[in-house]
Amino acid sequence: MEKKRLLSIFAKINIGLGIIAIIFATVTVLFIGFPQLFHFFNLSSPEAEFTTLTQSMESDFERYGSKIEEKEIEEEEEKKEGKMLPPIDFALPNKKLLNIPKIGVEGTILEGEDYNTLLEQGIWRVNDFGTPEDELVMILASHRFGYITWTNEHRNKNSFYNLPKTGVGDYLEIVWNQRLYKYEIYKVEESTEINDYTADLILYTCKLYNSPERIFRYANRID
C-alpha cells in the first residue's frame, strides 16, 4: 500500500513537471514566433528598442568623418568612379523602396530628421548620409521587433526582424526615383557601432530590446 502511495505521488509530480515544461515551451515558441507579444507584458519595450536602435545614431556622422582615413576615401572614390546611374524605368513605382527577397522585406524608405516618428512607421534613411545617387554611404535603419500597433503584414515588410537570416552573397534592391539599384551583402557584423564606412549601403537594427549590440549588414552596388 505504501509503495502504491509513493508511486502515485511520483506520478503526480511528473505530471506537474510535464505541464510546467509544456507551458514553458509553448511560451518560448510564442515569443520567438510572435515577438510583438512581448509588448503585452512589457509596455516599455518599444522605448527600450528605440533607445537601443538609436543610441549612437547622433554621433555616426562625426565618426564617419573621423574614422575614414584618406587612403580609404581614395579607394572608395576609385571603386565608385565611372559607375553610372541605372536607367529610368517608368514601369517602376515613383517611390523609394527597399526590397530584400530572402526575408520578404518590401518597405518604403522614409526620409526626414524626426527619426523617432519615422522609425515608428518603418524604414528610415539616416540623414546626413548618402542616397543611391551619390558617393556617400547610404544607411538604412528599422526596428527589429516594432510596435504592437503594427499589423503582421506591415511588420513583415518593414521590420528588420529577420535581418540576421541574411548573409554574405545575399542580394537586395532599392528603387529610387524610378531607378533600380542592386546590391550584394559582403559583410555581416554584430557590434555597438558601424565599423566599415566603405560600403555603398549599410542596414542595421537592434539585436535585443535593451542591448547595446546592433546587427549590421554591409553591401556594395553590383550593377
Image (tube, grey):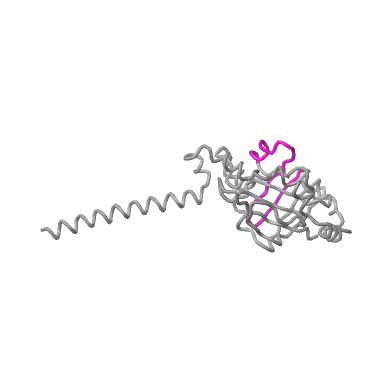
Q: Is residue 209 left or right of residue 138?
A: left
Queried whether the magenta region covers residue 104, the answer comes back as yes
Q: Is residue 42 left or right of residue 157?
A: left
Seen as rendered, the residue at the extreme left is 1
Q: Tell me: residue 52, above or below residue 163.
A: above
Q: Quadrant of residue 55?
A: top right
Give x and y (percent) for residue 133: 83, 49
Give x and y (percent) for residue 204: 66, 51
Q: Tell me: residue 147, above or below residue 195.
A: above
Q: Residue at x 76, y 53 (%)?
A: 67
Query: How many marks are shown on the rendered structure?
Result: 0
Q: Residue at x 58, y 43 (%)?
A: 49
Seen as rendered, the residue at the extreme bottom is 169
- The one nearer the camera, 48 or 171, is 48
Give x and y (percent) for residue 203: 69, 52
Q: Residue at x 12, y 58 (%)?
A: 2
Quarter placement of the N terminus: bottom left
Q: Is residue 209 left or right of residue 97?
A: left
Give x and y (percent) for residue 96: 75, 45
Q: Residue at x 59, y 51 (%)?
A: 207
Q: Which residues are magenta?
A: 95-121
Quarter placement of the C terminus: bottom right
Q: Quadrant of residue 56?
A: top right
Q: Tell me: residue 85, above or below residue 53.
A: below
- The one nearer the camera, 221 or 48, is 48
Q: Is residue 92 left or right of residue 204?
A: right
